[in-house]
Image (cartoon, grey):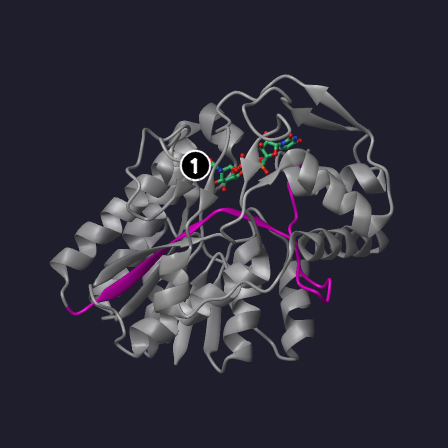
Amino acid sequence: MKVLVTGGMGYIGSHTIVDLINNGFDVISVDNFSRSTTEMQFGIEAIVSKKITNYNIDLTDLDATKNIFKNHSDIQGIIHFAAYKAVGESVEKPQLYYHNNIVSLINILQCVEEFNVPYFVFSSSCTVYGNPDEVCVTEATPMKLAASPYGATKQMGERIITDFIAAHQNKTAVLLRYFNPVGAHPSAKIGELPIGRPMNLVPAITQCAIGKIPSLTVFGNDYNTRDGSCIRDYIHVCDIAHAHTLALQYLMNKKNTSNCEIYNLGTGTGVTVFEAINAFEKVSNIKLNYTIGPKRSGDVESIYANNNLAKQLLGWQTQYTIEEMMQTAWTWEQAIAKA
Ligand code: UD1
């Protein structure tokens, strides 16, 4: 089955392409490298030992997007990753985020309709829960106001797809809500490439360890948690990637009970910032130079996933421990330092 992966050269998209190919899918990618580099394409090709077709086009250009489907009338599934994802940038440039993330989604759905693509998987986020009333969230936990324009684009994206699927009864979709994707492919040929100073914890840890940034700041140590730092559900990017393959297979095999289903993708275990730092120090044998700073505005105190649905219905099992997440992230950081 031919699958179009949008944002295929990004962090999660690249790992998903590898997983899809390893599971027998025929994959084409569309990515304009606005937040990635051609190195990711070479990395994927090195892992799977074959060339990947990537269309370097902007999905906000409807005609260019349609041309991909005209060239590939046999596309049966779409996994839609392409979106901007930096929370801080979205606060500074909301129009950019609403335009890019929403228009590209609308254009892709236009193609789903016109070219009759039956299966759709969407890259959503636990950010849709906002600041929830319960720390262990299920898919039924009510969404609160999104804390950023980025989060709002994910909430809107889910709503747009839900409405679209309701109006197109011959199409099915899965919306995947990622918790905190971290780590890299064990080959260290693909991984996360933060633009500028890293905002997320794990790239900040590895960049601090390698000396790219002078120190690490822990944003707050007086939260109401077991050690005072925030709790998140870190999940290995390869585990996230494999869930997309399972979601497509689930739709193709008509295992779904409704036309649009939602799944949390987390390990189900909360890890504090200090525990994440300790796990890194243990696997790398490096003492991190960190200081305690003020709380970061907009941070949720604690959130982790109830992942029972993905386990039971998609047959998903996470494979990687927090130490393995840190080890692969560290091996990747060292690989890019050498390149
Ligand atoms: C958030 C979103 C997530 C989104 C991601 C994109 C939520 C719950 N999560 O993740 O959906 O995909 O942004 O960027 O809305 N930290 C430090 N020092 C640092 C960096 C981070 O202490 O230098 C702490 C943060 O305060 C937080 C934890 O580490 O407690 C994780 O932060 P981060 O990696 O930025 O992810 P989230 O903010 O959880």
Left or right of residue 53, residue 95 in this image: left
Which is nearer the eye, 317 or 1? Answer: 317
Quadrant where the N terminus lies?
A: bottom left
Location of residue 315 in the rendering, given as x and y in whole percent from the top left corner: 41, 70
Q: Residue 193 lies in magenta, yes or no?
A: yes
Classify residue 273 by image quadrant. Answer: top right
In the picture shown, does residue 23 fall above or below 290? below
Quarter of the image for residue 78 reads bottom left
Majority SS type along the magenta span: loop
Three-letter amino acid code of the residue under disc 1: Val
Span colored in magenta:
170-196
Residue 276 seen in the current view: yes
Residue 166 figure quarter = bottom left
Q: Secondary structure at mark 1?
A: loop
In this view, which residue lies farthest toward the top?
294
Furthest residue toward front: 226
Of residues 32 and 167, which is closer to you in this image? 167
Is disc 1 surrounded by few (<14), some (14 to 19) or many (20+) residues within 10 Å?
Answer: some
User: Which residue occupies 25% across, 71% down?
Assistant: 118
Relative to 322, 334 lies left or right: right
Residue 263: give x, y in percent of width and height: 36, 56
Which quadrant of the figure contains the C terminus? Answer: bottom right
Q: Is 103 within the magenta?
A: no
In the rendering, at what x and y percent does residue 307 appear? 42, 55
Residue at image mark 1: 135
Residue drawn where x is 80% and y is 48% of the image: 282
> Is 100 located above or below residue 335 in the figure?
above
The structure residue drawn at horizontal position 62% and vertical position 61%, both measured from the top left corner, is 320
Q: Position of residue 50 (x, y in %)?
A: 62, 79
